[in-house]
Amino acid sequence: MGASQTQNSTGRSEKEWQLTLVKPFISSTYAFDKIREAHLHIESGRTVGKIVVCL
C-alpha cells in the first residue's frame, strides 16, 4: 500500500470506504420554522432513525 492509500479501522482503503453505500434511515424531515416540533419529536423518545431539519 503506497503513501497515497490509507486504511481505516475496518481495513478498507479510503476509496473503498467512499464507494460503500451507506444509507441513513431518516425518520422525519422538518422545515426550519418547525424546529420546535422536531425537538419535541426527539424528546419523545419514540424516534427511530434521524431527524432532518431543512434550512
Image (cartoon, grey):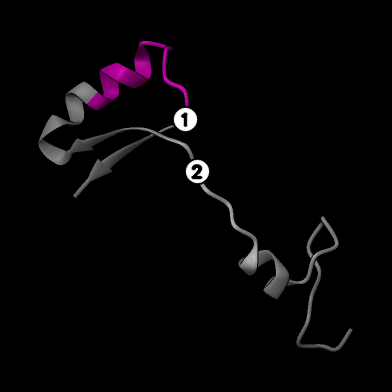
Can you say whether 10 is above or below 54 in the image?
below
Q: Which residue is mark 1?
A: 49
Q: Quadrant of residue 44?
A: top left
Residue at (16% x, 39% y) in the render: 31
Q: Which residue is mark 2?
A: 24
Callouts 2 and 1 close, C-beta under 8 Å: yes
The segment highlighted magenta reads: 38-48
In this view, which residue lies farthest toward the right? Answer: 1
User: Callout 2 environment at 10 Å: few (<14), some (14 to 19), or many (20+)?
Assistant: few
Q: CA distance from mark 2 to mark 1?
A: 7 Å
Residue closer to the observer: 17 or 35: 17
**Residue 6 percent coordinates (x, y):** 79, 75
In this view, which residue lies farthest toward the left? Answer: 33
Residue closer to the observer: 22 or 6: 22
Q: Indicate whether residue 50 is drawn in magenta.
A: no
Can you say whether 7 is above or below 9 in the image?
below
**Mark on residue 16?**
none
Q: Quadrant of residue 37?
A: top left
**Residue type at the position of mark 2:** Pro
